[in-house]
């Protein structure tokens, strides 16, 4: 009772704190501006609250009074007529991309935002078009970006937005413009002196445009590959493969042009004199680390895609007839469960204003999952043939309904992996990766443990869990292209999935690779209420993992792999003291031999942290559940930033 009262008091304090923030914004003496409401949009981005973001952006762009549901002044009323700039628009697009609300983003591509669209806006739109199979709209954005680049090459269009602002000297001087960094364009209400030179060189502007163009071509290449390998008939497959290879070539060309323009801009810049402690931030090479890493990742992905498509083109008959692969996108859709990305008390987005608190109603749950496939992945764009659209739609609806247990609301893994289960002589081992990113690691494990590549088939099936909808859609596309049947993607909050959707005692292993700490320092004292890895999460993980048998064998395992030693110390201390069911210790630290050990009798190097073995110097090996060693994007990204030390812990359910 004391714990319940303390929890209730904490919730009340949090509600009062949030209400205080909103009250501060709508105070009569607090004049609203686009910067303040852009920050509010960023908070909706963190919360993955698309509905509030749509309401706010509509109010910002509106010139008429917006009706309030409760009749009182609220945030939307206060934002009325503030206007939007490129930063506000791009933040809104990021909300739509992260939550999968593609339809809301498309509504904002008309003339009302034409003046504030920039390269980032076009890239975000291109990603959403590719994600939802809107091929024509994606090509339009590519043509638009190419036109913008051509204008720049002809001396037009470079930093046109910076030439806006107020021309008359009666307005106060724009301090950002004075410092050479104003990017508000037409939204800027201050004076722009035409004699002040801006710091951003034209070559860097060109590098940014080429980077955007290369990303767009990458989106087109992935879309064409998906169509070629899962949708196109034999007659159209050659055409789709040819279009894919052409897009890959254009992507590689744009990457090269971006690199050349970026190197020229960095070498040609005049670096101002800075203090020693500011040198790291002033270094242009450090500022471009993230962009360069993304470019390398894109080139790497294009090499992978070219290899897959070329093999399909050269020997389509053998790859399509494999017993362990699927060539239909319908089956891939059935293994893509899109729960809500919003952090809240609901598990699914309330698309149809249906009360889904009753977990026994599997039909409503499956129907909402179906609607999310339509909204985020362009299901209607895929089912274009009128003659078989109804048949395919009904079949997918039935498959989704069977996947959600009608009594418990849990995922039925036998139905989710229907084809794999039919072939398996014994039960499947179910493995879950939490925060799977783009799914690169999970796909590699699924490929290594599939019956076609594993000599000692363990009948392992893999679930890639990811909160962000855009990353979940990337995983879906990788599954389609790979044709693997033993992997599924489940989008949503991992904690709620473990607690509400995954049956107790069902998972064989849980993997957490490169978890994000509550704070960049990784310090245990750092507070973040939205951090995923807390005691409640590990209790839910303990409940979902399989129990040990009578002989003490076969218990579910938990493996955590990271580059942050400080955060791993924090997690080790948390897990070592975790208790469940009448103060029983939840997890037991296990021995591991690492991935690079030559002998399976020599334990890897470790540090004892309150009874937990914290291993260092290598990646987890097969004894820790890793079927194969595969670098993830985050692994390569931190290596590029000179963070090369690796740490891992292995636990078993007691």
Image (cartoon, rainbow, N blue to C red):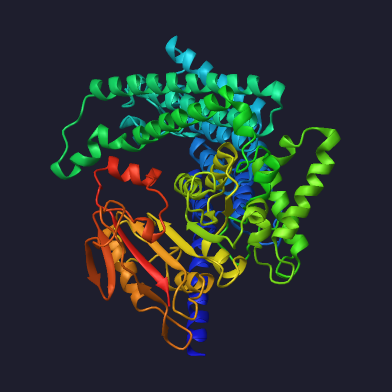
Q: Please state, as top left, top right, bottom left or bottom right, where the C terminus lies in the image.
A: bottom left
| Residue at x-position 23% and y-position 71% | 608
Query: In this view of the protein, which residue sits in the foreground, 531 or 597?
Result: 597
Q: Position of residue 124 (x, y in %)?
A: 54, 35
Q: Is residue 22 left or right of residue 200?
A: right
Q: Position of residue 40 (x, y in %)?
A: 51, 52
| Residue at x-position 70% and y-position 24% | 234
The furthest residue to the top: 154
The furthest residue to the left: 276
Picture quadrant of residue 256: top left
Up-down relation of residue 152 to residue 171 (above or below): above
Q: Position of residue 152 (x, y in %)?
A: 44, 15
Q: Is residue 5 left or right of residue 519?
A: right
Up-down relation of residue 242 to residue 116 (above or below): above
- Residue 111 visible in the shown view: no
| Residue at x-position 38% and y-position 60% | 624
The furthest residue to the right: 387
Picture quadrant of residue 278: top left
Q: Is residue 91 left or right of residue 178?
A: right
Q: Position of residue 370 (x, y in %)?
A: 72, 51
> In the rendered picture of this protein, how many numbered marks are placed on residues?
0
Query: In this view of the protein, which residue sits in the foreground, 210 or 109?
Result: 210
Q: Is residue 435 left or right of residue 72?
A: left
- Residue 54 visible in the shown view: yes
| Residue at x-position 57% and y-position 72% | 504
Up-down relation of residue 435 to residue 589 (above or below): above
Query: In this view of the protein, which residue sits in the foreground, 128 or 621?
Result: 621
């Amino acid at each position: 009772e004391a714990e319940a009262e303390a929890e209730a008091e904490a919730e009340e304090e949090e509600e009062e704190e949030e209400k205080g923030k909103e009250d501060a914004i709508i105070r009569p003496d607090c004049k609203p501006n686009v910067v303040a409401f852009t920050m509010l949009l960023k908070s909706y981005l963190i919360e993955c609250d698309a509905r509030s973001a749509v309401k706010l952006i509509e109010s910002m762009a509106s010139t008429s009074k917006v009706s309030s549901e409760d009749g009182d002044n609220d945030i939307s009323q206060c934002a009325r007529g503030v206007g939007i700039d490129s930063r506000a628009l791009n933040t809104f697009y990021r909300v739509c991309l992260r939550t999968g609300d593609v339809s809301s983003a498309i509504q904002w591509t008309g003339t009302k935002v034409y003046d504030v669209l920039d390269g980032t806006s076009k890239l975000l739109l291109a990603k959403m078009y590719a994600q939802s199979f809107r091929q024509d709209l994606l090509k339009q954005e590519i043509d638009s970006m190419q036109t913008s680049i051509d204008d720049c090459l002809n001396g037009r269009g470079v930093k046109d937005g910076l030439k806006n602002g107020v021309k008359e000297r009666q307005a106060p001087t724009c301090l950002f413009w004075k410092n050479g960094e104003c990017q508000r364009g037409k939204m800027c209400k201050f004076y722009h002196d035409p004699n002040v030179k801006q710091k951003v060189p034209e070559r860097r502007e060109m590098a940014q445009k080429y980077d955007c163009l290369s990303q767009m071509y990458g989106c087109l290449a992935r879309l064409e590959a998906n169509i070629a390998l899962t949708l196109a008939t034999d007659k159209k497959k050659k055409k789709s493969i040819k279009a894919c290879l052409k897009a890959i070539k254009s992507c590689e060309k744009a990457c090269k042009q971006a690199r050349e323009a970026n190197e020229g801009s960095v070498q040609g810049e005049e670096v101002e004199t800075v203090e020693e402690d500011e040198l790291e931030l002033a270094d242009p090479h450090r500022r471009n680390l993230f962009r360069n890493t993304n470019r390398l990742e894109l080139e790497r992905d294009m090499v992978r895609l070219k290899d897959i498509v070329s093999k399909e083109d050269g020997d389509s008959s053998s790859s399509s007839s494999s017993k362990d692969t699927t060539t239909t996108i319908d089956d891939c859709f059935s293994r893509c469960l899109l729960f809500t990305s919003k952090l809240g008390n609901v598990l699914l987005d309330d698309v149809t204003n249906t009360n889904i608190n009753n977990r026994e109603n599997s039909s409503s749950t499956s129907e909402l999952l179906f609607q999310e496939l339509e909204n985020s992945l362009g299901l209607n764009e895929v089912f274009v043939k009128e003659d078989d659209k109804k048949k395919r739609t009904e079949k997918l609806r039935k498959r989704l309904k069977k996947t959600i247990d009608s009594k418990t609301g849990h995922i039925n893994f036998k139905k989710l992996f229907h084809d794999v289960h039919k072939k398996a002589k014994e039960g499947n081992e179910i493995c879950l990766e939490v925060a799977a990113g783009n799914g690169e690691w999970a796909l590699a494990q699924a490929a290594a443990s599939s019956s076609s590549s594993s000599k000692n088939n363990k009948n392992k099936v893999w679930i890639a869990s990811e909160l962000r909808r855009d990353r979940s859609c990337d995983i879906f596309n990788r599954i389609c292209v790979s044709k693997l049947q033993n992997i599924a993607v489940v989008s949503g909050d991992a904690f709620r999935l473990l607690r509400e959707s995954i049956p107790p005692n069902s998972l064989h292993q849980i993997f957490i690779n490169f978890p994000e700490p509550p704070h960049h320092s990784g310090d245990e004292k750092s507070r973040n209420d939205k951090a995923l890895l807390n005691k409640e999460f590990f209790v839910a993980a303990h409940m979902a993992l399989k129990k040990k048998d009578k002989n003490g064998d076969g218990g579910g395992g938990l493996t955590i792999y990271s580059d942050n030693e400080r955060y791993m110390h924090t997690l080790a201390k948390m897990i070592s003291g975790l208790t469940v069911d009448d103060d029983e210790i939840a997890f037991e630290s296990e021995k591991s031999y690492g991935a690079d050990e030559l002998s399976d009798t020599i334990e890897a190097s470790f540090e004892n942290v309150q009874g937990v073995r914290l291993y260092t110097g290598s990646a987890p090996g097969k004894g820790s559940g890793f079927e194969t060693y595969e670098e993830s994007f985050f692994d390569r990204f931190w290596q590029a930033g000179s963070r090369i030390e690796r740490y891992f812990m292995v636990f078993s359910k007691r």
